Image (cartoon, rainbow, N blue to C red):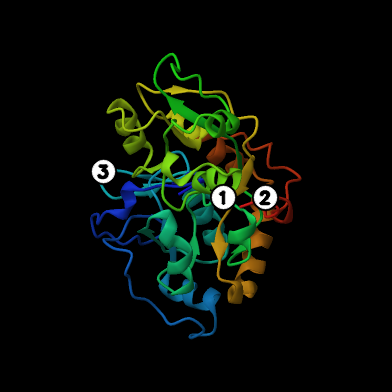
Amino acid sequence: MNTTISRRQLFRGALALGGVVAVGGSLAACTTTETGGPEAGGGGGLLERARQQGLRIAIGNEPPYTELAPDGTVTGAEPDVVRAVAARMGIDRVEGIVSGYDAMIPGLKANRWDTIAAGLFMKQSRCREVAYASPVIVSTESFGVRPGNPENILTIADVLERPDLRVGVVPGGFEQGILETAGVGAGQIINVTDARGGADALNADRIDAFLLPTLSLRELEGVEVTEPIEDAPSTGSSAAFRTEDQDFLDAYNEELESFKTEPEFAEILEKWGFDPTVVEGVTTEELCAVDG
């Protein structure tokens, strides 16, 4: 989001799920991250190929950034925006491919998908490897804790000061980078599969808290969500592309900026609990300056 999704980021989507391919603008998940597809650089560039064969997007399963329904349909704030912008570009088929956050950028570079639309939050290390579109989501981080927050975990500084605390993160997610950049010890950072896996680990006393975007945590039952963490960076996300697909990104950004002025953009974000006004004036360059 962000590893779902999500900040993201996402997750149960690393499992193999029903093999449905989206047609006519709908969006659904494929069975595996090892999908084939057109070779990079062929067929006149990504825009032409996507119009002819569809756009392949890597997604996770971390509501509200991305969500995988029981029937295999993929929705969520980021995929819904990508689908709307793609339609404006003459792309009427979007195929969602479920991936773990740590595999999203390698998979993009290996041409397993054409873009990442999963709440993969911008930060310096990621922005050196991929090209992000104009921001769509700006988000905060919180801890998921047991009811009453018995360990009184409210800040990253609290975790640093108490080496006995165990904090769950999704591997490869933005939150793992927050803790590592702050100097939290590796023994304190515990991998969980996704938001639900974090709640399960918390209830089983395998962790004392888990770190995810605030909105992702609010989707869970039986977990107390702290106020946004004051010493954790706020960041944002948008679709991410290969650096060599700059022509596609330019066309995508043109349509995205126009789409942001329309009621449908606000409706999508509000549907998933995001405030569409907080992204106004926020730039990709600003979010890419976040440490990590």
| Mark 2 residue element | loop
What is the spatial separation of the Cα atoms under label 1 and label 2, in whole angstroms?
Answer: 10 Å
In which quadrant of the rendered view does residue 221 lie?
top left
Type of amino acid at the residue the image marks with label 1: Phe
Type of amino acid at the residue the image marks with label 2: Val
Is 282 left, or right, of 90 in this rendering? right
Considering depth in this image, is 256 or 189 the residue closer to the camera?
Answer: 189
Asked if disc 1 and disc 2 are in contact, CB closer than 8 Å, the reply is yes
Q: Nearer the viewer, mark 1 or mark 2?
A: 2
Considering depth in this image, is 120 or 186 the residue closer to the camera?
Answer: 186
What is the spatial separation of the Cα atoms under label 3 and label 1, in whole angstroms?
Answer: 26 Å
Image coords of residue 161 (percent x, y)? 56, 30
Question: What residue would you read off at disc 1?
Answer: 121
Mark 3 / mark 1, whichever is N-terminal: 3
Disc 1 packing (10 Å; few <14; some 14–19; many ≥20): many
| Mark 3 residue element | loop
Mark 2 / mark 3, whichever is N-terminal: 3
Q: Extreme right residue here?
A: 281
Type of amino acid at the residue the image marks with label 3: Pro
Relative to 96, say whether 158 is above or below: above
Disc 2 packing (10 Å; few <14; some 14–19; many ≥20): some
Picture residue at 38% right of the left edge, 58% below the top: 96
Picture residue at 42% right of the left edge, 34% below the top: 166
Question: What residue would you read off at disc 3?
Answer: 70
Mark 1 / mark 2, whichever is N-terminal: 1
Whether residue 148 is visible to the viewer of this picture, yes or no, is yes
| Mark 1 residue element | loop
Disc 3 packing (10 Å; few <14; some 14–19; many ≥20): few
The numbered mark at residue 290 is 2
